Image: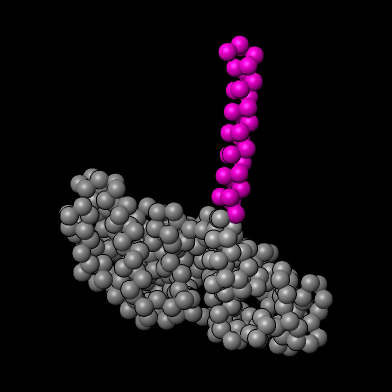
Amino acid sequence: MPADEITEKMDENSKDSDESLETHLVELYSHTLDQDLERAKSKEAILIIIRGLPQGKKFILNQPEMRIGRDPDVEILIDDGGISRKHALIRKTDSGYTLEDLQSRNGSFLNDIKLEEVVELNKEDMIKIGTTILKYIPAGEIEILYQDNLTNAAYMDELTQVFNRNYISQVFEAEFKRAKALHTHFPVLLFDVDNFKRINDCYGHDAGDHVLREVVQVFQQADLRELDLLGRWGGEEFLLLLSNSSIERAMRVSERIRKLIEQHRFLYEEQVIPLTISVGIADVRRGDYACYTDLFKAADQALYESKRKGKNQVTLASSGED
């Protein structure tokens, strides 16, 4: 076959191959889109903070009525000095959700218009209360899946699938300011896996990763509230924020987690790995803390005391008055 005919044949084959690949990609994309649409059907409506702290925080609208405000008892708690304690109300209807201002000090705004009556929310409505802006996404919208992925990428620890240090630091700071302003208790619990370096050295780093993932699973057995926030602070350290909770409860939760870890059978490739955890607790009402980093340092010092006293125990930071 002459060279020019060979070249022409190769061009035709290449064209057919390109068209086949394009057809395959279109089919694959359509299939993926159909799967995402099906998954989205089961998703509840959400509000997501697009301006304010912590930016990107998502509130799932899964109750008949949910109040927005900075009172510890509201369902959608936002730390913003311009927001009333009970500022606005989200109410479920047959067709979606409505928004109502609860005679707030500074008013509630929907798409920059001040609310004078109850209004029905529509897709991508912007709710402004104080200096915080929340975006409304109705149930079943595919964008909710996108927000899930965005949240996971920005705020989730890849190994353990709990919140990462970036996210939990933002919440820590906001909750500290709220607790100081409202004079409420805010215990923070700092956990550290005992002798973790020895686990890595004796069993390997894959075993260490496995242990950390399983530690998080044990945390879930401690009857935590939805309001309680767990995050991986770094390495083998975990931080648990118990907003508006008593010191007594903080001690009970810490001791329960400590015992659960001690009693749990950590198994990796048929090897049992003995494991314990040490805990340090500090509360905003038990010291003169100027900022959230001071409160963290107090919890860290209490954790150090637990380690110094033999590990596998809980220590409460001194009040400064003892």
| Residue 142 painted magenta | no
In the image, is 200 to the left or to the right of 243? left
From the viewer's perspective, is residue 167 above or below residue 185? above
Q: Is residue 299 visible?
A: no
Q: What's the residue at 60%, 83% (across, down)?
A: 66
In the image, is 209 to the left or to the right of 310? right
Relative depth, front residue between 12 and 42:
12
Looking at the rendering, the stretch of residues picked out in magenta corresponds to: 1-30
Q: Is residue 216 visible?
A: yes
Q: Quadrant of the N terminus?
A: top right
Task: Please identify the residue farthest to the front as the structure is shown.
Answer: 1
How far from the left and from the top, in percent, is residue 37? Answer: 59, 64
Task: Please identify the residue farthest to the left as the structure is shown.
Answer: 271
How far from the left and from the top, in percent, is residue 318? Answer: 37, 71
Q: What's the residue at 59%, 39% (across, down)?
A: 20
Q: What's the residue at 17%, 57% (across, down)?
A: 272
Q: Main secondary structure of the magenta part?
A: helix
Relative depth, front residue between 91 and 22:
22
How far from the left and from the top, in percent, is residue 309? Answer: 23, 63
From the viewer's perspective, is residue 130 above or below residue 164? below
Q: Quadrant of residue 170?
A: bottom right
Q: What's the residue at 63%, 16% (across, down)?
A: 5
Q: Quadrant of the C terminus?
A: bottom left
| Residue 25 painted magenta | yes
What color scheme is it?
one colour
Q: Quadrant of residue 125?
A: bottom right
Relative depth, front residue between 239 and 209:
209
From the viewer's perspective, is residue 49 above or below residue 102? above
